[in-house]
Amino acid sequence: MGPQAEYFDLLTKGQFRIQRCNDCTSAVFYPRTHCPECGGTLTWATPKGTGVVYSTTIIRRKPEHGGDYGVALVDLSEGVRMMAQIVDCAPEHVHIGMPVRYAGIGPNADTILYRPEHAA
Ligand SMILES: [Zn+2]
């Protein structure tokens, strides 16, 4: 199984993982076979779960399909950037620089969810 298939397989099992290099300890995302920094081998690791919104987009959706939702590029504390859906926050309130925390895996096991760090 390739690293991308492995990543989604882990999500299906409820495990959100990114990769870490065994040699230079760089965090790696999107999943790869070798470290892009040094060519070293990679191990799956559980992210701390914290991050900051780098950019944000509102996806428009009809109310009968669940309504609008916010998609963001999130910079994880580990130093990698990934696409995520922001939950527990109106999409128009998601802003660049907002601290977010890991909130689970989306229903189709293909989306990572984050919520505002300071959500009530
Ligand atoms: Zn490396």
Image (cartoon, rainbow, N blue to C red):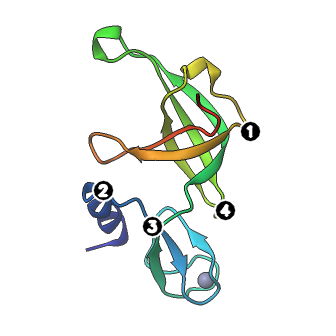
Which residue extends farthest front?
120
- Residue 62, x across and y down, in percent: 35, 10
Horizontally, residue 37 falls left or right of residue 18, namely: right
**Residue 91 at x, y percent in the picture:** 55, 22
Quadrant position of ligand 1: bottom right
Seen in the picture, residue 32 relative to 108 is either above or below; the reply is below
The residue under the point 54% across, 25% down is: 89
Q: Is residue 2 above or below residue 52?
A: below
Q: Residue 60 occupies which quadrant of the picture?
A: top left
Which disc is residue 14 wearing? 2
Quadrant of the image for the N terminus? bottom left
Mark pair 4, 2: CA separation: 22 Å
Residue that protrudes farthest toward the top in the picture: 63
Q: What numbered label is drawn on residue 79? A: 4
Question: Counting residues from the N terminus, which is met first, the one under dot 3 or under dot 2?
Answer: 2
Distance between mark 1 and mark 4 Cα atoms: 14 Å
- According to the image, label 1 marks what residue? 97
Q: Secondary structure at mark 4?
A: loop
Which of the 4 image quarters holds residue 24?
A: bottom right
Q: Residue, x 74% and y 38% (percent of image)?
A: 97
